[in-house]
Amino acid sequence: MFSDVSKAIILGVVEGITEFLPVSSTGHLILAGDVLGFTSETAKTFEVFIQLGAILAVVWMYREKVSSSFRGIGTEKTNRFLLNLLIAFLPAVFFGLLTHSFIKRHLFNPVTVAFALIGGGIAIFVIERVIKKSVVKDVDDVSFKQAFGIGMAQTLSLFPGVSRAGATIMGAMCFGLERKAATEFSFFLAIPTMFAATSYDLLKSLHGLTAGDLPVFAVGFVVSFFSALFVIRAFIGFVTRHTFDSFAVYRVVFGVAVLFYYM
């Protein structure tokens, strides 16, 4: 029904739209790939590869902050910011290396994703009502303790369907970051986290690819980049005016629909 290029476009859009929203890009890719019949080992490598497009969208969107961080290495402000990213990054590395094979083998399926979507939606709804006070309004003001807390929250996203963005944004809000600052810290943390995760997966999978896979991978990469770029711009504007309740409702409704479909 769909050509490989058509599937690449669809999955590129899915990745770009969902990667930085609290709805789980991995979960949506698993579900979309299952519906499209795109579930081979090459397909799994493709889904990892197109995440690089989404990462580069963040780098491009925040290129001034990224470049100033490189230029400012050695200054107190930049060193603190980069150290915070490292502190927040390391828990996912540690637990990811311990659990990666088990998760890939046993948890990458639609039903598991559905339960994670529902549970994450309920968590967002609760956090929005429990958290009343935010003290950090800028990513440069995050403390080492807050960075570590956000990093521990990010480890929850190793479970497919939880959402890396959802875990880090909600975790950051729980540790005192204002909504916009929490979202931007999540974006910056995505750069080292996703580069590391995708590089690790790709190094293990590249041997199974052929030259014929290149056009499909390229299309997915480009579509993912531009889709993510659009969503990042819109999402930052959204979080300054709204709560995350709409995403909580979406997750629960979508998760229940998936359960009915597969069970």
Image (cartoon, rainbow, N blue to C red):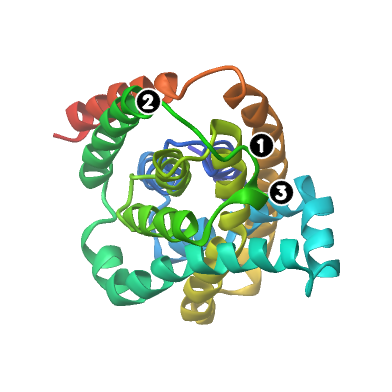
Question: Closer to the camera: disc 2 or disc 3?
Answer: 2
Which element is circle 1 on?
helix
Q: Earlier in the sequence, mark 2 or mark 3?
A: 3
Q: Which residue is mark 1?
A: 232
Classify 212 as above or below 151.
below
- Residue 128 tag number: 2
Between marks 1 and 3, how big is the CA–CA gap? 8 Å
Q: Earlier in the sequence, mark 1 or mark 2?
A: 2
Question: Type of residue at label 2?
Answer: Glu
Residue 50 makes an appearance in the image:
no
Are the two marked residues, 2 and 3, in contact with CB atoms closer than 8 angstroms?
no
Q: Please name whichever residue, 21 or 150, is drawn nearer the observer in this view of the structure.
A: 150
Q: In screen coordinates, is 190 left or right of 91?
A: right
Between marks 1 and 2, how big is the CA–CA gap? 21 Å
Residue 78 makes an appearance in the image:
yes
Which element is circle 2 on?
helix
- Picture coordinates of residue 94, whole percent (x, y): 37, 75
- Please report the residue visible at 42 percent of the width from the left and 72 percent of the height from the top: 93
- Please report the residue visible at 59 percent of the width from the left and 45 percent of the height from the top: 12
Q: Which residue is mark 3?
A: 57
- Picture coordinates of residue 81, whole percent (x, y): 66, 61
- Picture coordinates of residue 47, whole percent (x, y): 50, 56
Question: Type of residue at label 1?
Answer: Ile
- Please report the residue visible at 69 percent of the width from the left and 69 percent of the height from the top: 79
